[in-house]
Amino acid sequence: MPNEPSLDSLLEIFSFEKKADLVRHCKELTVSAEDFFKLVLACEMWGVPFLHAIAYKDKVPPHLVPKDSEIEALQNTPAGSALAGGAAKAISKLAQAFVDRRYLVGHVFFTPDKSKWHFFCFDQRDLNTKGNHWEQGSHVHFVNWLWPNFTADTVWQNLTTDDDRPGSDLHLRFVEPERESKMETKKCEFTQPVEKRSSTGLHRGMFDEDVRFEFNVKIDSSKRGHLEEMLRLFEKMSSSFKEVWQKKLESLK
């Protein structure tokens, strides 16, 4: 039977010197979003018990990235005209990309000399409570310095360069606190750009307060102006996102 989540049981995984003992412990371990957030916060603020780094990868299947000719066809489609040919393909690929893309997140906790390190990673499908590919449901993946074929640098490069997680990893049960099904919805306006900050990449604990912003955007795919604005937004967000985490990555060198 899985154990109830606790911060002590999470921290215990950092203490093992033998892989067999670690594997045995992880079979019963359950990690909660709250405990993981506390661990990340402690490491980020005080560097105790480890240094910490995080990376995000938004992985879109190559066949769903519109070609330059398709984007050009979309841009050249007169406002109000029905989409056809390359323009229609561009919109179809963009729409399917939202379904098939992988939002991959990795956390590495390490000593200054990287002799001991611990790596957690997951994507949005790993955290699904229903229809999960792992029979025990929501989980995160884990490896550490006890894996002889990996180093902190290789697992990090595997994530940031190859857009993938290491093989032969352990599955750790992951739970998030239940929320009330009802949520109060308020309309609000912002007088300046909103900056979202995350310390974990998890669904929970992403803000200092338990809040959610929900934006309903209506896009008329037959209107050129709407589509151009959407593409500009994608470009702006991806550029800003890459710049922030590129700096984070450089700090590891």
Image (cartoon, rainbow, N blue to C red):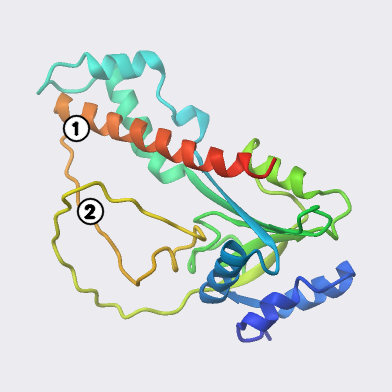
Give the residue at x 79% y 53%: 114
Task: Kindly indicate the quadrant of the structure image that contains residue 177.
Answer: bottom left
Give the residue at x 61% y 86%: 4
Q: Position of residue 185 (x, y in %)?
A: 18, 68
Crowding near pointer 2: few (<14 within 10 Å), some, many (20+)? few
Quadrant of the snapshot with the N terminus: bottom right
Which callout, 1 or 2, points at the residue further toward the start of the chain?
2
Q: Nearer the viewer, residue 47 or 174?
A: 47
Task: Kindly indicate the quadrant of the structure image that contains residue 226.
Answer: top left
**What numbered label is drawn on residue 215?**
2
Q: Would residue 28 appear left or right of 174 to someone viewing this image?
A: right
Q: Nearer the viewer, residue 252 or 11?
A: 252
Against 231, residue 25 (above or below) is below
Give the residue at x 39% y 16%: 68
Q: Position of residue 79 (x, y in %)?
A: 11, 21
**What numbered label is drawn on residue 140?**
none
Question: What secondary structure is marked by label 2?
Answer: loop
Q: Nearer the viewer, residue 39 or 78?
A: 39
Q: Position of residue 183 (x, y in %)?
A: 24, 74
Against 189, residue 102 (above or below) is above
Q: Is residue 139 visible?
A: yes
**Three-letter amino acid code of the residue under disc 2:** Phe
**Dot 1 corresponds to which residue?**
221
Q: How far apart in space, not on screen, are marks 1 and 2 (Cα)?
A: 18 Å
Crowding near pointer 1: few (<14 within 10 Å), some, many (20+)? some
Give the residue at x 16% y 23%: 82
Q: Would residue 22 appear left or right of 198 to someone viewing this image?
A: right
Q: Which of the two discs, 1 and 2, sits closer to the camera?
A: 2
Question: What secondary structure is marked by label 1?
Answer: loop
User: Are the residues flagged by discs 1 and 2 in contact, CB closer than 8 Å?
Assistant: no
Task: Kindly indicate the quadrant of the structure image that contains residue 236.
Answer: top left
Q: Is residue 163 visible?
A: no
